Each structure stands twice: as C-alpha cells, then as structure tokens.
Image (cartoon, helix red, strand yellow):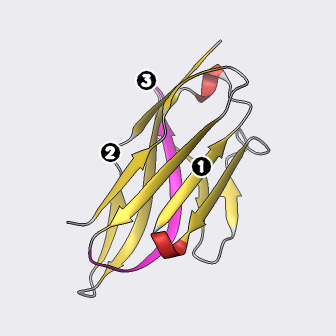
Amino acid sequence: QVQLVESGGGLVQAGGSLRLSCVASGSIFSINAMSWYRQAPGKQRELVATITSGGSTNYADSVKGRFTISRDNAKNTVFLQMNSLKPEDTAVYYCQTNVVLVAGVARPLWGQGTQVTVSS
C-alpha cells in the first residue's frame, strides 16, 4: 500500500515552533515535488510550501521567513519546520506529492493530515 503519513502536529503557544514530518512508503520508484497544504476551519485548503526533487523551494507569502521546507530523498521524507507560529497558522496540515510506482503508474498522494493549533 502506497501512502503518506504525517506526524509532528500539536498544540503550541504563539511564537513557538513545531516540526512536521511526512514519510512516503510503498512500492515507489520516484517522487516528484513534495508539498505541504493546510486547511483552517471554514476555509479552503491552501498551499503552504513546495520543494522539488532537486531542492528548489517556494512558500506562501504568509509563511515566508518563518517556515522552512526540506526533504530527505533517501528516506522519502519531507519536513516542515515552523517557527514564530501565529494563531492564524492553526489548521490541519496535509502532505502531498505525485509518485511514480515501481509498476510504472503515476499517482497523486495525500496524507491524512495532522492538526496544528497555536494558542494566543
């Protein structure tokens, strides 16, 4: 079974930090860009950050300078280091990528989500 599993969410005070992790597992041949999205209650899901297989990154304006995305290609893992957290960062965070399976089939994958709550 091919899947993405996130971890690292939790409750933190404003100004604090959290580090999210997302591991891809299964019969994967290659992984393309990996991204983090978030969805706050009553709002649409939004793209937070993306990292290509070569390490190029892009961030939403709302998190630039505070969040850092990175990846470990050998471990099929992507990270999101979140610093200087604000209450408006409260959301469910989702990992997303597109993989090519060993069988040669391309598939989009989403994780199950991890809750991040920032108290004021």
- The answer to whether residue 22 is left or right of residue 27 is right
Query: Measured along the vertical axis of the image, is residue 48 above or below residue 43?
Result: below
Q: Is residue 79 above or below residue 24?
A: above
Q: Amino acid at mark 1?
A: Leu
Q: Tell me the residue at 70%/41% (across/down).
A: 63
Percent across and percent down for residue 15 are: 73, 24
Disc 3 and disc 1 in contact, CB within 8 angstroms: no
Q: Which mark is residue 80?
A: 1
Reading the image, the residue beneath label 3 is 42
Q: Whole-Å distance between the Cαs marked 1 and 2?
A: 16 Å
Which is more N-terminal, label 3 or label 2? 3
User: Quick one: SS at disc 3?
Assistant: loop
Asked whether 9 or 43 is in front, the reply is: 9
Frontmost of labels 3 and 1 is: 1
Residue occupying the point 28% across, 85% down: 102
Give the Cα distance between marks 2 and 3.
Answer: 18 Å
Q: Is residue 82 above or below residue 78?
A: above
Q: CA distance from mark 3 to mark 1?
A: 23 Å
Residue sitting farthest toward the top: 120
Q: Magenta stretch?
A: 27-41
What residue is shown at x 52% (from left), y 51% (from top)?
Answer: 36
Q: Badge 2 is on which residue?
A: 112
